[in-house]
Amino acid sequence: MSRQFVHSFHTDYIAFSPGNAAGLDGGPQTLLVLFKVDSTTDNALIVGRNVSNATVWSVNPASDNKVYFSASGFAATVTLSNGVWYLLALTKANGSAAVRAHLYNYDAATWSHTDYGTVNDSSAGPITEYRVGWIDSADRLDGKLAAVGLWGSVLSDGQIEGLTAALSAWKALSPAALWGFSQASVATPVPDLTGGGANQTDISGTNVSADEPAGWSYSIGTTVTIGQATETDTAQPMGRGKSRTLGQVAETDLAQPMARLKTRILGQAAEQNFALPLANTPIVAGRGTPTVRSQTSTLVVASRSEVTVR
């Protein structure tokens, strides 16, 4: 599943509050986008805009099939093909620095990592809004988005190569903002999966598409409490019902039940269903010291002293 944007509709976009990603108006930064371009045109992936709606920085595939990163200056980076799912990461250090493009082709299962040009940080910040799928009236996406992530750090080549299969791996690297476009309806707002407040604030158009990269998972993982049965994302936690015999010490899940030692007065009825009552031994006058009989049960029984009969 993904979100489809149609270039000819002119107004397809989703807008977000900057949340914890408000400070990403320059490097160090990593921009990560999982997308497919359906046709060669002046597309748009994501733009950071200021309070005057001016562009702070943007990422847009152009009609020459190259992806451009623009801030104070721009760099033409990787070349795309239509109809292919790509994972694109753009990383840039602080100040005037090269833009390093990392591109994974899901059809060919190949990576490339290449530096392009030199771009300065923008002076137009701070960012007050992010938009995906639309930069301006000319640059609009004709394709699909599955996920977008923003970091205030430069991820390494190795870290980025571990992000092709699941959104949970993206979240594990602590992004400043993270959006997954798996909603079954465009009426469902897109949340910031980091909890950092970069949530959807506006939407125009777009459609839900069943298309997504092969093997991709939107799961961000679940937390399971010790002793709790494994649950699905929508299931309620399941507890184990337990009972405890009166007098039994509380037990852990792995421990064996522990019984408490008890004493009984001679002649007292047994407490367990499988224990027999203890019998008294009668004392007969003139017969000397009586014989004391003991009986075994599952409980410890008090012993009886000898009695001298005169």
Image (cartoon, grey):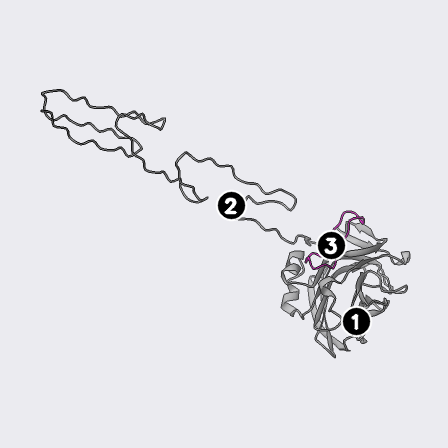
- The amino acid beneath tag 3 is Pro
Q: Secondary structure at mark 1?
A: loop
Q: Which residue is mark 2?
A: 227
| Residues at marks 1 and 2 touching, judged by CB atoms closer than 8 Å | no
Q: Residue at x 60, y 44 (%)?
A: 231
Image location (x, y in percent) of residue 85: 75, 59
Please tell me how crowded label 2 is: few (under 14), some (14-19), or many (20+) other residues with Cα within 10 Å. few
Looking at the image, tell me whether mark 1 or mark 2 is earlier in sequence order. Answer: 1
x%, y% of residue 183? 75, 49
Rendered image quadrant of residue 46: bottom right
Instruction: Residue at the far top: name it.
Output: 285
Q: Is 46 in front, or is 145?
A: 46
Q: Residue drawn at (35%, 28%), measured in percent from left and top?
A: 272
Q: Which mark is residue 125?
A: 1
Residue 226 magenta-highlighted: no
Task: Give the left or right position of residue 67, taking residue 163 as reference.
Answer: right
Q: Quadrant of residue 103?
A: bottom right
Tell me the element at label 3. loop
Residue type, mark 2 in image: Gly
Mostly what secondary structure, the magenta segment? loop
Within 10 angstroms of label 1, few (less than 14), some, or many (20 or more) residues?
Answer: many
For marks 2 and 3 on the same chain, the one whose residue lies earlier in the sequence: 3
Residue 193 counted in the magenta span: yes
Q: CA distance from mark 2 to mark 3?
A: 31 Å
Residue at 70 percent across and 73 percent down: it is: 28
Magenta residues, start to end: 181-198
The residue tagged 3 is: 191
Residue 88 visible within the image:
no
